[in-house]
Image: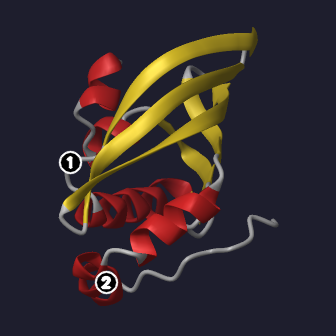
Amino acid sequence: MSSVFRAPTVESHSALWHDDVVLIQPLMPKAVGRKQCEEGFARLFRHIPDLHATVKRWAAVEPDVVFIEFTLAGTFGGRPIEWDAVDRFVLRDGLALERISYFDSLPLAIEMALRPRGWRQLATAGFRPQLSRLR
């Protein structure tokens, strides 16, 4: 499981998801179902190809609810970028049925906006930041 965070791929993440998975996170649209989630992660890895996570701690608060606190890091616009996040997973049959990621997206969005070298990459991938996570 730790390799999923240290050297993530679309395939390694997808293997952890239930077919009906729902992913909700700042700056990206809500993704429903394995295909949308795989497409979302593929776009993310195109923007930040070396993206990886360092897990700080985790807790299972119920048999089917897990929280993971971590730092995401990679390269965007030719320079390192990183941010802290906490994900809450709801599991079914040992697979992620729902994942909500919590982090302050404003500093990350500003940091990305200040890197003109990354703008073309975002524009050509159709990046449209989601400023609200309202369902």
Residue 61 sits in which quadrant?
A: top right
Give the class, few, some or many, for how many residues have Cα within 10 Å of label 2's Cα (few <14, many ≥20).
Answer: some
| Direction from residue 111 to residue 78 in the image, left or right | left
Q: Is residue 26 visible?
A: no
Q: Which residue is mark 1?
A: 50
Q: Viewer-proximal residue, 28 or 98?
A: 28
Q: Residue at x 57, y 33 (%)?
A: 96
> As rendered, which of 79 and 4 lies closer to the eye?
79
Q: Pinpoint residue 112: horizontal percent, then vertical percent.
A: 41, 69
Q: Earlier in the sequence, mark 1 or mark 2?
A: 1
Amino acid type at mark 1: Asp
Q: How is the image coloured?
A: secondary structure
Give x and y (percent) for residue 129: 55, 77
Q: Quadrant of the C terminus?
A: bottom right
What residue did someone put label 2 on? 119
Residue 48 visible at all: yes
Where residue 78 appears, as percent x and y from the top left, is 18, 64
Q: Is 30 positioned to the left or the right of 18 in the image?
A: right
Whether 25 is drawn above or below 120: the answer is: above
Q: Secondary structure at mark 2?
A: helix
- Residue in view at x 47 percent, y 57 percent: 37
Label 1 neighbour load within 10 Å: few <14, some 14-19, many 20+: some
What count of labels does the image hold?
2
The image quadrant where one finds the N terminus is top left
Please tell me the numbered disc located at residue 10: none
Q: CA distance from mark 1 to mark 2?
A: 17 Å
Which secondary structure lies at badge 1? loop
The residue lying at 56 percent from left, 20 percent from top is: 94
Is 67 rendered above or below residue 53? above
